[in-house]
Image: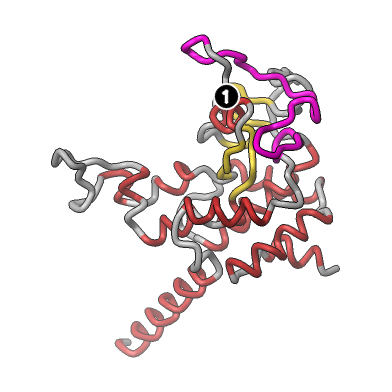
Amino acid sequence: MKRLAILLLAILVGFSLSAQERGNTKIQSFPEAKKILAKLYQNHRVTFYCGCSYDKKVDHSSCGYQPRKPLNKSGRKNERAYRIEWEHIVPAHAFGQSFREWREGDPKCVNKNGKPFKGRKCAETNQLFARMEADLYNLVPAIGEVNGNRSNYSMAMIPGEVRRYGACDVEIEGRKIEPRPAIRGDIARIYRYMDAAYPGHGVISRKNRKLFEAWDKSDPVDEWECERARMIEKVQGNQNTFVKRKCNR
């Protein structure tokens, strides 16, 4: 019995390690990931949710985008509507809740005034969380305003077609977000990858599992999704098999 228990433990440990190896083990921080992504997207400067062209700023005329809030709280131009930000498709908040540092803090998470803190900044001291946060497969360029409005909301199908960003086909209502049909499969395959690469971190809820399976089928991989996956694999070292196996057909 003792040998059997040791064997089972070894199998479980081996499975755990192999699961982690399938995820990001090379990119160590979110700032590092953003620098890499800026280079990877040099020849495909298109925002994810709205399909807008961008260089230093987003070209609203390229996609018919209209800021949801043209002015900020100070009455000045809403610069975030023109800025590119790197959006986590699976929100850091979603998997961050599985880390003790996020929920409770840690003795090493103390600010300059000696006050303890928790949440995302504390979770970033955990190497696994930092690698999940920096996983290139989970990051896409988005208009800052859309990224901010999306927050940590989950994907869903929202009744009606209320457009609050001009011609951009994205709905964000009731703490839910519904993306345009052309990227639903991309989103599904990112969620499924993150769920498989980092098991036990609450990436996909039971409620959304069938939704992502449906999106995966309704929106097949396209040339850019395959190219993006190939570039990330070269840099990060691991595969998104939910994309790669369909690109090789």
Residue found 18% across the figure and 42% down from its top: 112
83 inside magenta stretch: no
Give coordinates of residue 137: x percent, y percent.
61, 56
Q: Position of residue 89 (x, y in %)?
A: 59, 44
From the viewer's side, name the closer residue of 80 and 214.
80
Q: Amino acid at mark 1?
A: Glu
Image quarter hosting the N terminus: bottom left
**83 relative to 63 in the view: left or right:** left
Observer-nearest of 182 and 12: 182
> What residue span does the magenta drawing correspond to?
47-75
Query: Residue tagged by mark 1?
Result: 79
Q: Quadrant of the C terminus?
A: bottom right
Q: Is residue 109 above or below residue 243?
A: above
Q: Pinpoint residue 68: horizontal percent, then vertical percent.
A: 64, 17
- Horizontal arrangement in the rendering, residue 164 relative to residue 75 (left or right): right
66 magenta-colored: yes
Instruction: Residue at the far bottom: name it.
Output: 3
Q: Is residue 242 above or below residue 177?
A: below
Q: Which residue occupies the extreme left position in the image?
A: 114
| Most frequent secondary structure within the magenta stretch | loop
**Local crowd size for mark 1, using a 10 Å CA cut-off: few (<14), some (14–19), many (≥20):** some
Residue occupying image coordinates x 79% and y 24%: 64
Q: Residue at x 69, y 32 (%)?
A: 58
Expressed as whole percent of the image width and height from the top left, the position of residue 72 reads: 52, 15
